[in-house]
């Protein structure tokens, strides 16, 4: 009898992402131009199970890449649920594995507040800290780069950059890598992988 291997968190996330977040059609992108598909990761990252899978999948990606950090953050609002899910997943993992680091979260505003503390970063913010910048979809990389710059302005060190889906177009990866310097750019999936899984699901359902 052949033992069945349980799917990883990333594999389960890909299945859900393809079902909930991927759409075919004609769409205008924020970067300009049109595309025959659209991926709205927030539908999945704000889904109860999708959020859980997102947190664990990113933590496992960081572990596999030997990335250690104090916090995870990104530009509002695409990064918001990702940050919360990764931080919460790290706390759960630390219960079973006390040596596992807990990653706190921070969010980068698109502009500084005009009242109160007038700061741009909400949540964790400590000079010298190692941080991971996260985003949902990387197309041009503009939102990711904005978060990288804000973290460095706060004197935090960017240890890695992670996106859930890389569209592999518009020069996004190269732009992010140029901004990130020696910090590695990591992705969970490419858009082609999400599309292939979406089409497989349609085929299996007979649609």
Image: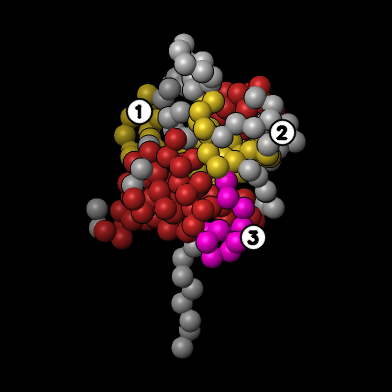
- Measuring 46% from the left and 77% from the top, which residue is drawn there? 4
Q: Position of residue 50 (x, y in %)?
A: 38, 50
Q: Please rate how many residues cluster around mark 1, counting C-alpha atoms within 10 Å: few if below 14, some from 14 to 19, many from 20.
A: few
Q: How many marks?
A: 3
Q: Position of residue 25 (x, y in %)?
A: 31, 34
Q: CA distance from mark 1 to mark 3?
A: 45 Å
Q: Answer above or below: position of 78 versus 120.
A: below
Report which residue position mark 3 lands on.
99
> Of residues 14 and 24, which is closer to you in this image?
14
Check whether the beta carbons of the residues at disc 3 and disc 2 lie within 8 A of each other: no
Location of residue 181 (image quadrant): top right
- Outermost residue, top side: 114
SS under mark 1: strand
- Outermost residue, left side: 207
Most common SS among magenta residues:
loop
Choose the circle earlier in sequence order: 1 or 3. 1
């Amino acid at each position: 009898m052949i033992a069945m291997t349980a799917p990883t968190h990333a594999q389960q996330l890909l299945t859900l992402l393809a079902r909930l977040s991927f759409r075919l059609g004609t769409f205008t992108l924020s970067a300009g131009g049109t595309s025959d598909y659209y991926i709205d990761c927030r539908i999945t990252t704000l889904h109860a199970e999708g959020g859980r899978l997102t947190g664990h999948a990113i933590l496992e990606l960081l572990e596999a890449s030997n990335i250690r950090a104090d916090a995870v953050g990104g530009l509002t609002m695409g990064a918001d649920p990702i940050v919360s899910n990764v931080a919460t997943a790290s706390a759960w993992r630390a219960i079973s594995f006390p040596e596992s680091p807990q990653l706190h979260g921070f969010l980068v505003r698109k502009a500084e507040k005009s009242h109160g503390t007038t700061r741009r970063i909400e949540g964790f913010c400590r000079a010298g800290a190692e941080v991971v910048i996260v985003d949902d979809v990387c197309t041009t990389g503009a939102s990711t780069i904005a978060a990288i710059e804000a973290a460095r302005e706060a004197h935090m060190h960017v240890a890695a950059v992670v996106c859930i889906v890389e569209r592999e177009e518009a020069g996004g990866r190269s732009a992010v890598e140029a901004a990130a310097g020696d910090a590695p750019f990591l992705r969970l999936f490419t858009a082609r992988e999400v599309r292939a899984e979406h089409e497989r699901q349609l085929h299996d359902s007979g649609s």
